[in-house]
Amino acid sequence: MVSCTAIGDGLKAAFAGEDAELVIEARDIIGNQRVVGDDPFEVEIEGPSTPQISVFDRDDGTYLVTWNVEATGQYTMRILLQGLQISGSPFLPVVMPGRVVAVRCTGVGRGLTRAFAGEDAKFTIESRDINRNKTTSGMKAFSVSVRGVISPQVHMIPGDEGEFHYSYRTARAGMYFVSVLYDGVDIGGSPFKLTVDPGPTHANGCSCSGPGITGGYTGMETSFVIQARDYYGNNRTVGNDIFNIDIGGTASARMRIRDNENGTYTVAYTPEIGGDYYISVKHSGIDIQGSPFTVSSDPMPREVIYCP
């Protein structure tokens, strides 16, 4: 009836996933507090999610109401006795996100699992409560680290609604792990397995090796291998680079190049006549390490046969 009242924080606000409480005070028609129980109060709550509600009769004219919902938002609460709403009903409690729970927090962004050497990688950590609602309630700082071949510094910029934005940069390609802890506990998915790929091919990092850059014999094919690398010296692992190779000097030389599709390129050539040659290897118009190379082509030594 309208003379009955209710008090408590649970009439105005609650946290998702946590019990909220209020007390119903039974009164007679002129407002006197009742001192016995057994009144059939009913509590109805409508909103974004289905509530769990319990009404406990204290047998002293008061009733403890406990309610819990998973979703945040505005709710409507009606407290009724024999079909009539009590004083102040309906109430309009607001349910806010609950406290941060580490295993419910999420990480999003490519930088958690993939990056390129020498480039900024980014990702975002979202603070969430037990029901995965974004939250800022009871929030502590996340502990974030990137560990692997080296351990780069991680930078953080706070966002809105419990989001934190992180960035890092590493010069070394390889396998890493991104660890994200909240209050000493890994968030969902942590540690994340991170692959850092080499950056784009850069002439300053590329090199050549093999007999073809030290010398050879006239009329005999020789070869050398180009190793494509990025600016930081990480070996490239895919092909399709364009290297400009020029062999000149005493005479021209027949040449062919094969893309091994693993970051290496085999160059084979045959000096036409003896003498000194130069070999220029460029990428994007820039000489790679050691280029141009100077090599000598000598006549093929004759086999000496000794007769008894």
Image (cartoon, helix red, strand yellow):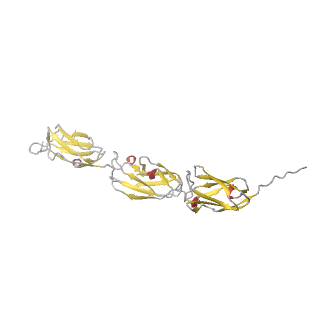
Q: Residue furthest left?
A: 30
Query: What x and y, as percent, mark residue 162?
Result: 35, 53
Q: Nearer the viewer, residue 174 or 58?
A: 174
Query: What x and y, as percent, mark residue 297?
Result: 73, 59
Q: Nearer the viewer, residue 75 or 248?
A: 248
Residue 215: quarter of image: bottom right
Query: What x and y, as percent, mark residue 111?
Result: 45, 53
Give the side of residue 94 with respect to residue 183, left or right: left
Residue 284: quarter of image: bottom right
Figure label count: 0
Q: Nearer the viewer, residue 131 or 22?
A: 131
- Residue 181 visible (yes or no): yes
Give the side of residue 223 with respect to residue 140, left or right: right
Relative to 54, is 235 above or below?
Answer: below
- Residue 61 visible (yes or no): no
The N terminus lies in quadrant: top left
Query: What x and y, as percent, mark residue 149?
Result: 54, 54
Relative to 80, is 100 above or below?
Answer: below
Give the side of residue 62 with respect to residue 164, left or right: left
